[in-house]
Image (cartoon, rainbow, N blue to C red):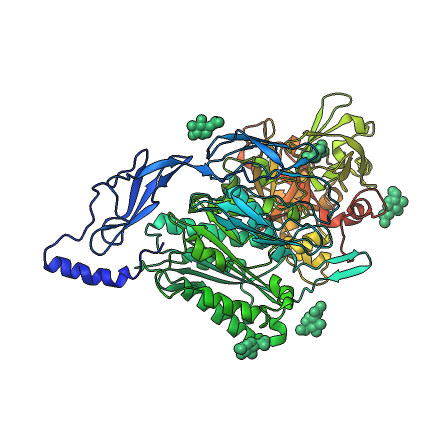
Amino acid sequence: MGFSIHWSWLAALSCLLCMGNEVRCDCTEERMEIVGGDYILTKQLKIGSMLVYQCPEGYYPYPHLTRICELNSIWKPAPKRFFPQRCKRVECPDPNVMEYGNIFPPQEKYFVDNETTYECYSGYRLRGSSRRVCLSNGKWSGFTPICSRDTGDSCADPGIPPGATRDGNAFGIDDKVTYSCNGELFLVGSSERVCQENGHWTGKEPACFYKHTYDTPLEVSQEFGSAIKGSLTTLEPIDDTQEGRKIRISKNGTLNIYIAMDISASIEEKDFNKARNAVTKLIEKIASFTVTPNYEIVFFSSEVYEVVSILDFLDKQITLKAILTELGNFKIGERNTGTDLNGVFTRFLERMAIIKQQVGEERFKEHRHVLIFFTDGAYNMGGSPAPTVEQIKNMVYMNQTGSQSYQSREEYLDIYIFAIGAEVFDSDLQPLATGPTSERHYFKMKDIDNLQETFDEIIDEEEVKGLCGLHKDYESIHKGNKRQMHPWWASITIKNQGLPRDCLGSLVTPKFVLTAAHCFTFEDLPEHVKVVIDDGQGKEKKIKSFKLHPEYNINAKVNKGVKEFYDYDVALIQLEEDVNISSAARPICIPCTQETSDALKLVGESTCKQQEEILLKNHLESLSFLNKKQGTTVVVKNVTAKMGDIRDDCIKHALGAPGISTKDPKEVVTDNFLCTGGQTPIRDDMSCKGDSGGAVFKNYEHRTIQVALVSWGTTDLCGLGGGDLHTRQTARDFHINLFRVVPFLKSILGNDTLDYAPLTFLKS
Ligand SMILES: *[C@@H]1O[C@H](CO)[C@@H](O)[C@H](O)[C@H]1NC(C)=O
Ligand SMILES: *[C@@H]1O[C@H](CO)[C@@H](O)[C@H](O)[C@H]1NC(C)=O
Ligand SMILES: *[C@@H]1O[C@H](CO)[C@@H](O)[C@H](O)[C@H]1NC(C)=O
Ligand SMILES: *[C@@H]1O[C@H](CO)[C@@H](O)[C@H](O)[C@H]1NC(C)=O
Ligand SMILES: *[C@@H]1O[C@H](CO)[C@@H](O)[C@H](O)[C@H]1NC(C)=O
Ligand SMILES: *[C@@H]1O[C@H](CO)[C@@H](O)[C@H](O)[C@H]1NC(C)=O
């Protein structure tokens, strides 16, 4: 992203001179070739252009990763005749640092695909992987093998990662071990770890990186995911009573997120768009948590281009949509190629100072700051950002840096650095990463291509297991499991007498599936019911029991001219075992629960009514349901619920359904139903037979909330090639409005006296 020192302002001058003397300014491609690889030029052969070598997977350019066309039209570093540039096999750090055991095969160097096995001396026990393979990113698969025996120490032997040296061999309370990396390797992670009273080491196992080592998208999303989620979830209210000690994390806190994206090398529009998309994705992901952070978003090269200012958040609420619109509309004209990383840190420091001034010292204490940088660290202007980082620490740590007590403020500041670029200046960048030592703050990525995907993966972690309705977008699962878009859907088949009956259902807790009562008959028993949730591990779920709504009675109005009456058409199926929650299997949010209030970002004590006003507010409310296709796929169907004074006009078409002889639509369609269908003003999709019991839902940012379930319809348009125009205009579907059956849902799902985890229903 940056180039060599100070070339940018001299470049213009020297080119003028060149033209005057009719001397060519350009570098040449002579002796630039690389054995076994290729190269690209960022600005052809012009001064300031960067030549970036490229090698196949498992190889890296050697001895140099890049060259710069200097002012004097000479490449720097210059190619050497007797030391040709080539693609070298990726090497992994030396595993022969393990103590008390043997490594096979013993080699001087280990390359991609080389396999190693580990064995401990007798009397020692192996922890970690007994077999490891050198991977193409320069890391070993699995975990560091450690041979240890029980010495009665408080902490377990922390081992020695490949390529490292450890100082410290005592593992009692307060004992310290320090790590360094051998040769040309550099250390990423905790260089120092202390044995704590609880028997755990502080920090995380460090790793030794070569210049060619990088993190995979999966590693980044796991590690960064767990770290950022720490920041995002500490602001959620938690009442955690442990050993009589009540930990109450204040919900008063404010989260400030500062994002800076280096675009100095993003000469091509597509790179800029990738950077922008990645930032967009990150913000969207953060929005799926219940916190609402303030944002400062900048792109930078020699200048700082502000997209969203954090100061705008101080006095007014800015919606996520507005932030994303700003980001989407942001354009950059002529860009300078210099890089002023310190300028960005300085900007952020200034912003913090203004916030502090505006909110006052006391409230500033409650502000957390998360700084996220994407850069290669090749700054060539503005000097080193290190002193500015110190000032930022001082401000957030309340001048307690250096003293013991600053640790109590450590969690208020995170500086994450994503090192991305053809040539990364690790030694300049790494020290800038800051935060609690238990988490990694420095990441090294091969390129910007996978960044968006990486951030999309972030939601898969343990910590978000509890979040109902979380799902992925279509764009983000192009290769993945399509279930991730609707991880809550269940397929239900009842095989008793006659033909099997198919229905849909929705997972509403790890143990319960919500569906329609009419899927069952009075003769059905749990063993007749098959529930399939294709979560990739034992699709078919065993059923413990099912319960229909006590007021459901299909024959209740036979005498009143309603042959089949579907009021209270809901049922809950209890599974024998909890479904394993993952990105492919996760409950949907249902009305009147605290979880749904969180998903809707309702703060304080919220009510059912507030939720209903958000979810079913419109005259025409856009909703979706799923239509089951062959096998294990579903497609989304869109409808508009007719609410308010257009509802009567919608439900009157119920009288056209077979088996209805009453003249009063309200006898057939009670207030417990939503009405959809017809062609005006919007053409609604119609449900088919097997769709009964499925969720009628609304996506709210990254969360899905079920508002109703598919019950019955006037007309089956599925087999008829869609039916004629009149039929389509008068066809209607009716869905049980879940807001009207909350007491039933609560009696089962909210019951905290039974052997499953209850949902928290709102008081009113
Ligand atoms: C390790 O990798 C190198 C380079 O690919 C290869 O030449 C060597 O045979 C491998 N060693 C083993 C034991 O597989
Ligand atoms: C939250 O902030 C208010 C006003 O700033 C203060 O009165 C209250 O004590 C704070 N609550 C907590 C839990 O810190
Ligand atoms: C921190 O130190 C600076 C300069 O020494 C001073 O201006 C500032 O008021 C101090 N802040 C706090 C919170 O003590
Ligand atoms: C859940 O996952 C665990 C571990 O992966 C596995 O042992 C268990 O059988 C799974 N349970 C279900 C219901 O799939
Ligand atoms: C259904 O609605 C969603 C959200 O409003 C929209 O993104 C999608 O394109 C619609 N699908 C169809 C088939 O119209
Ligand atoms: C919880 O379930 C038990 C057993 O089914 C029942 O007796 C009790 O009334 C239920 N509690 C609530 C609050 O519904």
Question: Is residue 730 in view from this perspective?
Answer: no
Compared to residue 760, the image places residue 475 above or below, namely: above
Is 516 left or right of 193, judged from the image as shown?
Answer: right
Question: Is residue 450 in view from this perspective?
Answer: yes
Is 293 left or right of 518, judged from the image as shown?
Answer: left
Question: Which of 48/497 is in front?
Answer: 48
Name the image quarter holding the N terminus: bottom left
Q: Residue furthest left?
A: 21
Question: Which of 112/525 is in front?
Answer: 112
Hey, which quadrant is residue 506 in on the image? Answer: top right
Q: Position of residue 243 (x, y in %)?
A: 81, 56
Compared to residue 675, the image places residue 414 above or below, namely: below
Compared to residue 386, the image places residue 197 above or below, namely: above
Q: Position of residue 654 (x, y in %)?
A: 68, 40
Residue at x-position 37% and y-position 58%: 331
Residue at x-position 61% and y-position 69%: 403
Is 195 left or right of 208, judged from the image as shown?
Answer: right
Question: Which of 214/572 is in front?
Answer: 214
